[in-house]
Amino acid sequence: MTQTLLPVALANYVGLSAVIFFIGVAGVMLRRNPLVMLMSIELMWNAANLLFLAFARAWMNDAGHIFAFLVITVAAAEAAIGLAIVVAVFRTARNVDVDEVALMKG
Amino acid sequence: MTTNLYSQADWAAVTPLFVVGITALVVLLADLFAKRHSNRYVSLLLGVLGLGAAAVICAQSYGQNYAAFGGGFVLGGFTVVFEEIILLAAGFSLVLYGAIGSEERMAGVVALMLWGTSGAMLMAGAANLMTIFLGLELLSLALYCLCGLAARATAREAALKYLILSSAASGFMLYGMALLFGASGSVALSALTAASVAASPFFWMGCGLFLVGLTFKLSLVPFHVWAPDVYEGAPLPVTAFMSVVTKAGALAVFARFAYAALPSGAAAHLLLPIWIVAGASMLVGNLGMLAQTDIKRLLAYSGIAQIGYIVAALAGGTSQGLRYAIYYLVAYTFMNLGAFAVVALCSTDKEEGSHVAALHGLGYRRPALAAAMTFFLLALAGFPPTAGFLGKVFILATNVGSGYAWLAALLIIGTAISLYAYFKVIRAMYDRAPSHRVVDVRPVAPLAWLSLAICLAGVLVMTFYPLTPSNVLPLVK
């Protein structure tokens, strides 16, 4: 038995991914907690992933799928390093508000 | 049934990258077995040998043009030249770390620098969006760790700032890449040259976001604020590494994109903002230098201005412009790393003599070192008997020749401003009355002296033999 997927127009995917991307951008710009900022960055990256998958289907080009897998892998490595750095900063500063992590200015 | 997807030639094209990456593993492995007090030299020796071997293998492929892995990595004169610059800068940074870095972190730092180097080399040859992203992230991930490896609180702060800002910039770039993929239906840069691509609305948005990300990595003006903080906080050899390797990698990607991957009509409109940004970097970088009291911050602002000069050389889209950009990049590598070597020779692991006050009266305490520093600063400022002067003349000539006289004017104004900042440091070194007691730090570092001498020789040789490789136009397939 074949199942037909509901046809979803490309524009919907692009619109959704744009919204997610801007939520991510706003999070990085407005929030001051590094953990939240890292999560917002993940949103930006995953918005791009969604776009890759949507275009992969629109163009019938598997490269978009492979790119998305690549991004997921790199994002995992990035998150591991990011959390390690946040922990290291927290150990010295006892807080993780980026406004108070400001020894260097100018 | 097995099919052989990739030929011997494909693997041969990326052998230098593999040599560097595998050397990093060998360094970590050797560190397990090395004796307590010899691991500094074991790691350093292995690292430098690996880079040297990669440089030799890389040089042998000069003159070949080959699109390996279906156009993922394109070998050509352009790629080889950038790979060699990256390997050279990485070698210097390793040596500087060997001279002043801490013993116990040695193997880790060497390995991370080597992985970062292989990422930058991948960027040098990358001709599709995937390999560009992979190279960029390989470099960036290594740099986040390297920034945070010093025990000082400022180093961790620098790592956090760099991590968040750089990942966000990668996010912009990635989203731009996704839109470019949507515009052309392919991840290959060569697909972007089709005239139909320029008609897609995704193309313009995608290019914009892609270039924003790249501008950040190049530390050009609106996205330069991270550079001084990160340069100041990171350990000195890491700063040296970052100041050249990241810029060389990002410049290679930008040059390939600007020269070979745009629809013919689109380039002029699309790249104009980049030239404006390059001009603004010359002014902001040089003005920013005036207020600095830390040599690493000063060199960060100097680097912002210098990358502005280098990018400006590409403005006409001529092969001559690219040759001059490469000439200036090599000159910058020597001048900049020379200055870093001098600071390293006033530093130890515990105490970095990067404050301008630490150089106070250096001309009387250590005349040779002060003379070398003066030479490098004059070269960065662009004084006549140096490669810095010649490079600037080349860039002026190509800018005026290709109708970007306003960039040339900005270059001259920027240089005039920078003179004051560089002379402030030189004056401090030859100031007889010290404002306060300066502790003279003298690490025993023959290796740092060696790299200093090589940088000096490099700047001088480039002045009298201004050779530029002729086979440098970037290819996309």
Image (cartoon, rainbow, N blue to C red):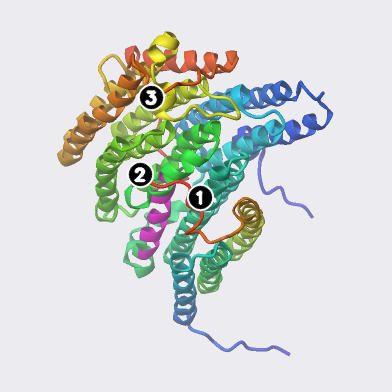
Residue shown at 52% from the left, 85% from the top: A8
The residue that mark 1 highlights is: B162
Q: Please state the chain letter of the residue tagged with numbered disc 2 in the rendered image.
A: B
Which x, y percent locates residue B373?
39, 18
| Foreground label between 2 and 3 | 3
Query: Relative to residue A80, is residue B268 drawn left or right?
Result: left
Give the chain letter at badge 3: B
Residue B209 in the magenta stretch? The answer is: yes
Q: In the picture provided, is B9 more to the left or to the right than B406?
A: right
Q: Is residue A75 above or below residue B82?
A: below
Q: Name the residue type under label 1.
A: Tyr
Residue in view at x 51 percent, y 67 percent: A44
Callout 2: helix, strand or loop? helix
Lower sequence index among marks 1 and 2: 1
At label 1, counting other C-alpha atoms closer than 10 Å, the crowd grade (few under 14, some 14-19, many 20 or more) is many
Asked if A19 appears above or below B109 in the picture, the reply is below
What residue span does the magenta drawing correspond to? B205-218
Q: Which residue is mark 3?
A: B331
If you read the primary sequence from the N terminus, does the residue marked by circle 3 or circle 1 appear first? 1
Q: Which mark is residue B259?
A: 2
Chain of residue at mark 1: B
Q: Position of residue A55 (x, y in %)?
A: 51, 70
Main secondary structure found in the magenta portion: helix
Using the numbered discs, state the Cα–Cα distance from disc 2 to disc 3 in whole angstroms. 22 Å
